Amino acid sequence: MRWERGWLRLVSLAEVFRNLFDRGLRVLVFLVKLDGVEFLATIVFLVAGSLTLLTTLVPDEDLDDGLVFLSLVFSLTEELTTIIKYYTKKICLYGSLIPMKQKTALDILKTGANVFLTGEPGAGKTYVVDRYVNWLQVCGIPVAVTASTGIAATHLGGMTIHSWSGIGARDGLSAEDIQTLAGKGQMQKRINKTQVLIIDEVSMLDADKMDMIDAVIRTVRRNTAPFGGMQVVLVGDFFQLPPIVARGMKPRFAYESSVWQSGRFVTCYLTEQHRQEDREFLELLRSIRRSEVEEDHFTLLRESMDTDCGSIEPTRLYTHNADVDQVNEEQLSSLPGKIQTYRMQSRGSNQLVAGLIKSCLSPESLLLKEDAMVMCTKNNFEAGYANGTLGRVTGFAGLDRCPVIETMDGRKVTVEPMSWHVAEDGVIKAEITQLPLRLAWAITVHKSQGMSLDAAEMDLSKTFVFGQGYVALSRVRSRAGLRVIGMNPNALAVSPAIVAKDEYFRSHSEQMEAVALTLSDDDFEKKHKIFVARVGGTFVKGSVEAKPPERVYKRSTYEETLVLIQDGKNIKEVAKARSITDSTVWKHLETLHQSGKLERTHVGHLTNSPKLNSAYAEIRYAFLKHGTEKLKPIYEAVGERYDYGLLRQARLRFLYEEDV
């Protein structure tokens, strides 16, 4: 009987595995993109996972000797385990084994599932949200776009979740408070109409606030399902700023709330990088997130202590507004010339206007002079700047005296007034208009949230809280615009709890991507239609997503370096022309070599010097022994007699001569 039971259960599972096999062909589309060893490691991982699933579904007593033997045959050997560990680390630094694509995340969002959309800075979270909101609006589905902070809400054109839900600044809600809020006509109309709720910067929303929002929504909608049955999309990165709590209190993150568990959020962890072109700096940020910081990473930052940003002064990051105001006022006062004053215009609800003014990064009264350092506070890709673009005022144009700024790459842009608004149901409730500029000698870390700064100066010697160093570093576009004036051993430490939770989010996202690989476009479309019908919308077939904005910079940073090298310039000349460090130029050259864009004839003048020729034999032997991935082992192998500049020069020569 035992063998019969086992056979019957295996037969019943056969149909499941047959279906998986039929759809598994789609997974091969992903697998064939991997190199040989990665392919082998992935296959072993999938086989081991399948056997684990099989042995979980079938009791031990029902497994015959053949299946047990098969399980043993496919057990991971020590060699394969090493391979998988190696590629797991490689994948952790450069992308997930099964990376979550923006299209996949968008397809999942359109099914109506509750989603946690996350990923490192520059992964495209805002872009995906914008496309989803546009799709919802085309389909006639009411959506509320909110954020945990006023600054983030202003960027989105929405309101804070505290204002939208009515909880305000309360630390708690009694049953009476909830009933009072639920009885307000405006609140009932807003919450009952909304079918999709988006909350940005969820890292700064604590667990108690999450549960309070859920309680209000469930009460208003008279629906006991999480968030009253509406779809909720949480957007953010828990390595960014945490919730603000009283001194001595430990923050409780949103994922620790009861509704996070009951809401069954699907994680979409975006891993593609659309902002960072500095691979070395990107690897540093990813290593911090993994809590795998090595001495090489500290060396990398120490090299940034003397970064020359040319005519642009890097913005200093502070933690307190008082320090920022003092620095900006002193610097402006020290400049000669007449002050130009620009006052903000407003219209709409007084309460909402007050909220917009408080949250807007451009001040109510903007004072400028020629030579003032300024920062753009809003995206305007057509004009040629983005939120965080730095520039220096070179003059004023037209009757309105609009400031003309020169950016880091030498472009001159005339900055004209722009508007920020609060909209609900497609109607603008309040609006303010001001030049999208602020003085940029200094800014708080909090106000730089969501920005990509061209250049920043920071003192990491004073970081004492988990994650402070990462939050500051992640504000900068590349190491070329980074100046570090201090460091301490704990500057790059992050919370072990957040690291562990991030691993869970990555794993969950990879599971979702693996499931998505088994679904065709038609499968997803059926699910999208079901969601649209359920919330009373009208399904629109075809691509209706917003057109992606044009990039401000047309040529990549690597191509800019290549052009100068092809002109015969040396490392120092390229670094000065591009306002980057020597080591960054070398890194660009190595990346260009790997991509096949840099020919040996382009770098002959860089790899043939008397000093290198005399030391090359010894350095070459060290590369043969230790490999070319890291320079520190080479530096130590040659007795620390040659500086890193010469070692980089030798590595490039070695790469061409040995063809590795």
Image (cartoon, rainbow, N blue to C red):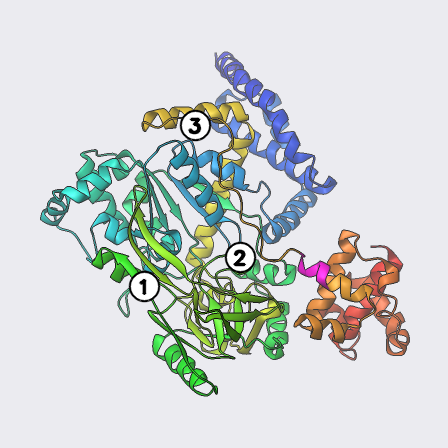
Q: Secondary structure at mark 3?
A: helix
Q: Residue at x 77, y 66 (%)?
A: 564
What numbered label is drawn on residue 345?
A: 1
Q: Earlier in the sequence, mark 2 or mark 1?
A: 2
Which residue range is magenta in the image? 555-560
Amino acid, disc 1: Gln
Q: Nearer the viewer, mark 1 or mark 3?
A: 1
Badge 2 vs badge 1, beta-carbon distance below 8 Å: no
**Alpha carbon of mark 3 to alpha carbon of mark 2: how far?**
35 Å
The one nearer the camera, 385 or 556, is 385
Q: Which numbered marker is on residue 290?
A: 2
Q: Earlier in the sequence, mark 3 or mark 2?
A: 2
Query: Residue 117 sits in which quadrant?
Result: top left
Badge 3 density bin: few <14, some 14–19, many ≥20, Cα 10 Å: many
Which residue is under mark 3?
A: 528
Q: Nearer the viewer, mark 2 or mark 1?
A: 1
The crowding category of the residue bearing disc 2, from other C-alpha atoms within 10 Å (few below 14, some 14 to 19, many at least 20), is many
Residue type at numbered disc 2: Arg
Whether residues under marks 3 and 2 lie with C-beta atoms below 8 angstroms apart, the answer is: no
Indicate which disc, 1 or 3, sits on the residue closer to the N terminus.
1
Q: Is residue 630 visible?
A: no
